[in-house]
Image (tube, rainbow, N blue to C red):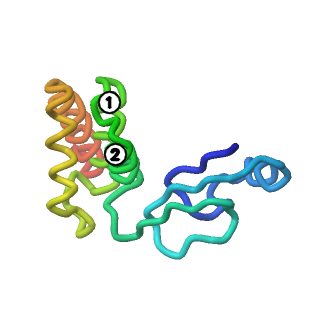
Amino acid sequence: MIFTLDFNNLVRIANMKEHVEKSNAQIIMIDHHEEPSDYADFMYSEPNMSSTCEMIYHFIDKMGDSNKIDKNISRSLYAGIMTDTGSFKFPSTTELTHQVISNLLKQEYLILKSITTYMIIISLKEYNY
């Protein structure tokens, strides 16, 4: 079984594309981008969702397993949502996105400072500061 996350076309994985296409494994795609190509056996596509990480959070939550989200999972999901939403500036950021972030912050209070500091540094580099 191959899971592809946060891309909806195999051209996005360059050299790995050939290996995935030749594989006999079932492919599961989880992605939020528009116009997915038809390469996966199973597709969870939500173009109106802010990020693949938000989709993964909802998947875990619907299974009733959000209590299993530990510090590392929380940090990873937070970072993915934050980067895919442009630090919550893009139109795909919704009230539901902020509810997910709130739930993640309840799991790990320190992630906000470390990840936000990192994103500020990246933003400053974009403006040549």
Q: Residue furthest front?
A: 64
- Asked if the residue under mark 1 is in contact with the one under mark 2, i.e. CB atoms within 8 Å, the reply is yes
Q: Residues within 10 Å of mark 1 (few under 14, many from 20)?
A: some
Alpha-carbon span between mark 2 and mark 1? 9 Å
Task: Give the number of the disc on residue 102.
Answer: none
Residue 89 pos. (x, y %): 19, 61
In-image side of 8 versus 15 (left or right): left
Quadrant showing the N terminus: top right
Relative vertical location of residue 49 with respect to residue 83 in this rendering, above or below: below
Residue 6 pos. (x, y %): 49, 54
Secondary structure under the numbered disc 2 in the rendered image: helix
Secondary structure under the numbered disc 1 in the rendered image: loop
Q: Residue at x 68, y 60 (%)?
A: 41
Residue 29 pos. (x, y %): 58, 56
Q: Nearer the viewer, residue 53 or 84?
A: 53
What residue is pinned by disc 1?
A: 69
Quadrant showing the C terminus: top left
Q: Residues within 10 Å of mark 2 (few under 14, many from 20)?
A: many
Badge 2 amino acid: Tyr
Relative vertical location of residue 30 with respect to residue 113 in this rendering, above or below: below
Q: Quadrant of residue 11?
A: bottom right
Q: Nearer the viewer, residue 9 or 96?
A: 96
Badge 1 amino acid: Ile
Residue 39 pos. (x, y %): 70, 65
Q: Residue at x 19, y 63 (%)?
A: 94
In-image side of 41 versus 62 (left or right): right
What residue is pinned by disc 2?
A: 57
Q: Quadrant of residue 63?
A: top left
Q: Residue at x 15, y 29 (%)?
A: 113
Q: Residue furthest bottom?
A: 35
